[in-house]
Image: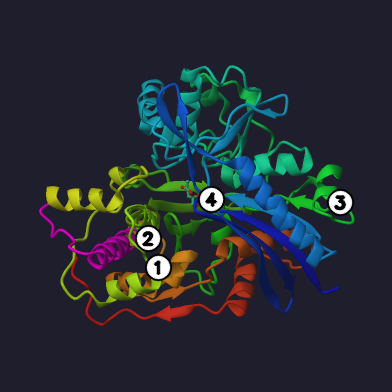
Amino acid sequence: TDAAVVAAVDLGATSGRVMLGHVGRAGISLRPVARFPNGPIRLNEDGHPSLHWNIVELYRSVLAGLTVAAAEEPGLASIGVDSWAVDYALLRQGRMLQLPYHYRDARTLPAVDLTHGVAGPAELYAANGLQFLPFNTLYQLTADLTAGSLDQADRMLLVPDLLNYWLTGVAVAERTNASTTGLLNVRTREWDEPLIDRLGFDRRIFPPLIDAGTRIGSLLPGVTDEIGARAPIDVTAIGSHDTASAVVAVPALTEDFAYISCGTWGLVGVELEGPVLSEAGRAANFTNEGGVDGRVRYLHNVMGLWLLSESIRTWEHAGETIVLADLLRAAGEVTAPVAVFDADDERFLAPGDLPARIRDYCREHDLRIPRSNAELVRSILESLADAFARGVEQASMLSGKNVGVVHLVGGGSQNRLLCQLTADRLGLPVLAGPVEATAIGNVLVQARAQGLVTGSLEELRALVARSFVPERHTPARTLVNR
Ligand code: LRH
């Protein structure tokens, strides 16, 4: 045959999906077979609220999606799993010890200081090349260590690795996602054992590393049976960090591109052949995450559509009925100048009343306080566009890479206002889409592993550009004054 069918399991922090991907020389097509919500579940821990992922329910949704996939495509060749980064489960003899924590849980705040008491930020950056985010896995593991829960564990599996383990029985760590732990050495891309030892973790809990494109195993008989497949299906390692898969599917046709992968987070940066470990890059909080084919994702985390979704959740919780399309239209019609706030401010990280925190920020910084939902949304979009533009400019300056075009992929690419505001602030064209970049990147790396497409990331991207033509946002002639 000249077309392979593979299934991409793509789990985001607000929703998950299972997609069937057909890939051949002619192009790629995607078909969603299941979509399901995801979000934190609040539990009580000894009088303290704690935030977790309902990973078992997620796994049930994944199996239900794979059941549909197997029924629709009896020839399904392979499955690949990606998710948000940094979060993990602890296991003992294959048994999960507790529900994974959500990276927005507050337990990491004291853990950051504890960790930095052992290894300071500059030293960590030299070892792992990662931007500082209070929820990087190494801080979470320090929290587990202090809580005593690490003693019992003999394995740590990041979320996609955990699902792969449940699907196949094989426990491995895929490198792109492992690079977000802070425990992978940025030069060797191996577990940094001296650092692991110093932080007091047991080396043996970290599974063997594998690269995207490697076959992990095949579905366990029980799983094959449960999803109604006729024969065991391969599970293939893909860029299991969702952002790594999204960057694979950036439909770039030239070298001079930057990307913004915009979903819950806005990941803004460039792709490089090697890391940049400069002090200026550390000060700007730029990260060197591992990409597919050994590339480096040199990027910065911007708070992203979380600002919008958490505001909407707040309003709905207060009894308002929100229609997203109407809200965005009203935001587009706001003519009064709105506040541009720092979308990176850490106060926006935790769940809860976001509009109140934005208003507080504006009050503290003598900015105009948004007076309606529409003004607040406009303020969010202007602030995101501003942060995106700064991110692209910094990525280019810090890496020396020339940027002539910006690709905005992921859910945010559907937000025309956001794309246009970003183009205006940058004075560069913004090419929007594909929306499902992450699933496409997941599908492509599986298809390449199955031998159905060949070539470099550049060739894969050309294939994406042919199948999903992006929408062009040309910058307004007058540059916005920042
Ligand atoms: C985006 C993402 C991002 C990480 C964050 C935890 O979904 O993976 O790259 O920083 O979630």
Per the image, the residue denoted by label 2 is: 396
Mark 4 and mark 1: span between their CA atoms? Answer: 35 Å
Mark 3 and mark 1: span between their CA atoms? Answer: 45 Å
Mark 4 and mark 2: span between their CA atoms? Answer: 34 Å
Say whether residue 179 is left or right of residue 276. Answer: right
**What is the three-letter code of the residue carrying label 2?**
Ser
Say whether residue 293 is left or right of residue 401. Answer: right
Q: Is residue 369 highlighted in magenta?
A: yes
- Residue located farthest toward the front when viewing the structure as drawn: 319
Mark 1 and mark 2: span between their CA atoms? Answer: 6 Å
Per the image, the residue denoted by label 4 is: 38
Residue 330 position, x and y percent, is 29, 74
Q: Is residue 71 highlighted in magenta?
A: no
Which residue appears at 26% of the width and 68% of the height? 374
Mark 4 and mark 3: span between their CA atoms? Answer: 28 Å
Q: Are marks 3 and 1 in contact (CB under 8 Å)?
A: no
Is the residue at mark 1 in contact range of ligand 1, meaning its CB lies under 8 Å from it? no
Mark 3 and mark 2: span between their CA atoms? Answer: 46 Å
Q: Secondary structure at mark 4?
A: loop
Local packing at callout 1 (Cα closer than 10 Å; few below 14, some 14-19, many 20+) is some
Quarter containing the C terminus? bottom left
Residue stretch rendered in magenta on the structure: 365-391
In this rendering, the answer to whether 454 lies above or below 94 is below
**What is the three-letter code of the residue carrying label 1?**
Val
| Observer-nearest of 202 and 333 | 333
Quarter containing the N terminus? bottom right
**What is the three-letter code of the residue carrying label 3?**
Pro
**What is the three-letter code of the residue carrying label 4?**
Asn
Is the residue at mark 2 in contact range of ligand 1, meaning its CB lies under 8 Å from it? no
Residue 391 position, x and y percent, is 34, 58
Q: Residue 403 bears which disc, if any?
A: 1
